[in-house]
Image: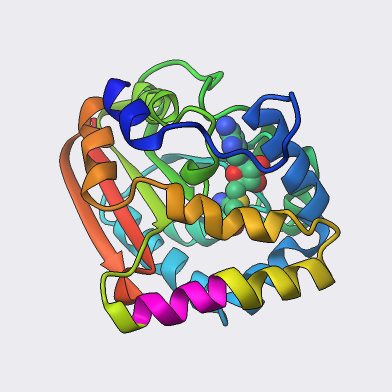
Amino acid sequence: MLYFEKIMGTPLTPYNTSESKKQQVATMFNNVAGTYDFLNHFFSVGIDKLWRRKLVKLIGKTNPKMILDVATGTADLAIAETKLNPDKIIGVDISEKMLDVGREKIKSYPSIELQLGDSENLQFNENTFDAVSVSFGVRNFENVPAGLSEMRRVLKPSGKVFILEFSKPGNWLVQKLYYFYFCNVLPFVGKLVSKDARAYTYLPESVRMFPDGQKFVALMQEAGYKNIECKPLTFGISTIYIGEK
Ligand SMILES: C[S@@+](CC[C@H](N)C(=O)[O-])C[C@H]1O[C@@H](n2cnc3c(N)ncnc32)[C@H](O)[C@@H]1O
C-alpha cells in the first residue's frame, strides 16, 4: 500500500466533484456506455479485439471452468472467453449502463452472467474461480491494491489472474505519435461522439498516471501473486500481466 501511495500521489478522478473516485468512474462509464463499443474499436482500429483475443488464448492454457471477468463493461472480454467453453463466466461492473449494453450482447451466450459489483469488494467466497480476467479496468480502480487482493482472494489455489491494460510505449518515436493521438485526436473525436467530453481527456491522463510495467509487477507482488509475467503488446501500448495465487 505504501509503495502504491508513493508512486501514485493524489488519485486522478474524472470530474472535480466531492464524490468518491469510484462514483465518478461509474458516472463517467454510465455517460459513455451507448457509444463505448463504437469508440473503442474506432480509436484502436480494431487492435483492442486482437489484444483481447491474445489474452483469451493465454487464459485458455489454464483450461478454466469458472471465470470471473471484473470491470467487464459491455462484456466484450466475457464474450471472447466463451470460446474456451467454461462452465460459467461471471462479469461484474460498477456501471449499470455498461452492463445494460452488455446484457443485450450476451443474450445468445447462456454461460455468461452479468452482475453489478465492485472489483475492490467482491461478493464471492474465496477460492471460487479458476481464472480472473480484467481488460482496461484496473487503471480505473479507486484502490488498485485492494482490487488486486480481492481478485487473488476469489481465485482457487494456483488459479491465475489475467490483466490487460494500457501502458506507455518505450520507443521514443512511437511515444511521440502515441501521445499526439491520445492527447489530441482521441479527446476531439470522443467529445464529438460521446456525451461526455471529460471521458476522453481522462483516458490519456489515467494512462499516463498508471504504474505500468515493473511498477505494476511490484504491486502484484505486494498483493501476493507469484510467477508473475509481464508481456508488452504492440510497441508496449498495452501490456498483459499474469499472476498466480
Ligand atoms: C475501459 S472500461 C473496460 C470495459 C471492458 N473490460 C473492456 O475491455 O472493454 C472500464 C470498466 O471498468 C469499470 N470499473 C471501474 N472501476 C471498477 C470497480 N471498482 N469495480 C467494477 N468495475 C469497475 C467501469 O465501470 C468500466 O465499465
| Percent of width and height locating residue 30 | 79, 45
Q: Residue 154, can we see it?
A: yes
Write down which quadrant ligand 1 falls in. top right
Q: Quadrant of the N terminus?
A: top left
| Percent of width and height locating residue 57 | 34, 64
User: Among all residues in the image, which is located at the extreme right?
Assistant: 195
Residue 142, by quadrant, is top right
Does 179 sit above or below residue 138?
Answer: below
The residue located at (44%, 29%) in the rendering is: 147
Magenta residues (range) = 174-182
Does 165 sit above or below residue 236?
Answer: above
Count every numbered label the image shows and give the total: 0
Residue 8, by quadrant, is top left
Does 132 sit above or below residue 148?
Answer: below
Left or right of 116? Residue 164 is left
User: Among all residues in the image, which is located at the extreme top?
Assistant: 125
Figure coloring: rainbow
The residue located at (37%, 75%) in the rendering is: 175
Left or right of 170? Residue 141 is right
The residue located at (39%, 17%) in the rendering is: 126
Q: Quadrant of the C terminus?
A: top left
Nearer to me, 155 or 42: 42
Nearer to me, 134 or 9: 9
Q: Residue 38, can we see it?
A: no
| Percent of width and height locating residue 195 | 86, 59
Predominant SS of the magenta segment:
helix
User: Among all residues in the image, which is located at the extreme left?
Assistant: 227
Residue 204, by quadrant, is bottom right
Q: Is residue 65 part of the magenta span, yes or no? A: no
Left or right of 22? Residue 179 is left
Does 175 sit above or below residue 226?
Answer: below
